[in-house]
Image (cartoon, helix red, strand yellow):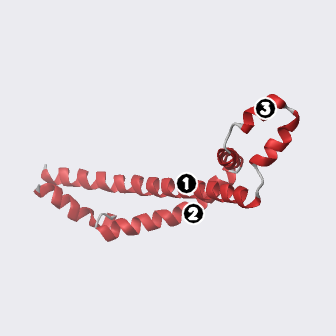
Amino acid sequence: DNEKFEEKTQEFIRTYIRIVVPGIGYAATSIAVYASSFLFLVLALAVSGRGYTDILAAANGIEPLRDLLEKADPAWGNTAIALLGCELLAPVILAATLALTPKTMDAVRNQMDEWGWGEDDIDKRVSELRSS
């Protein structure tokens, strides 16, 4: 009965590691790629002086729209444009995320091994669980 418990515990931990490492790798990569894309777009708009001011100028002939746009802070306008840009770039962001995720998974797996939580440490962890 004790051996069956140990076997089931090892199987659970192995499955957990096989699910968690890719999940953490994908989530971390996705957040990093999206944030980098967003920050790049915000910076490009700020440096170029384009973006919100161009939209404001284009709305010059439409008074109600221009009045509404003038109430917004230009920084928030550029933020909205950058978010829209990220939505338009979503297929590229997804492709970059999928291309980079394996490297992130390797880094997470290596870090877990370094901390003593890798697949090779399962036997040690199970024996720790049994002794507690």
- Residue 127 found in image quarter: bottom left
Q: Residue 91's spot in the image, x, y percent?
A: 68, 50
> Whole-percent x and y of residue 113?
34, 68
Find the distance from the CA under tag 1 to the CA under tag 3.
35 Å
Q: Earlier in the sequence, mark 1 or mark 3?
A: 1
Question: What residue appears at the point 79 percent right and 28 percent down from the top-left corner?
Answer: 64
Type of the residue with mark 3: Leu
Between 26 and 130, which is closer to the camera in this rendering?
Answer: 26
Which marked residue is nearer to the observer: mark 1 or mark 3?
3
Tag nearer the camera, 2 or 3 = 3
Closer to the chain start, of discs 2 and 3, is 3
Q: What element carries label 3?
A: helix
- Three-letter code for the amino acid on which mark 2 is drawn: Leu
Q: Which residue is drawn at 27% across and 62% down?
A: 122
At horizontal 66% and vertical 59% (from top left) the residue drawn is: 40
- Residue underneath mark 3: 65
Q: Which of marks 2 and 1 is in front?
A: 1
Q: Residue 78: horizontal and vertical position, in percent?
A: 69, 48
x and y percentages locating residue 32 in the rendered image: 54, 58
Residue found at the far top of this picture: 64
The tag on residue 30 is 1
**Residue position for label 2:** 100
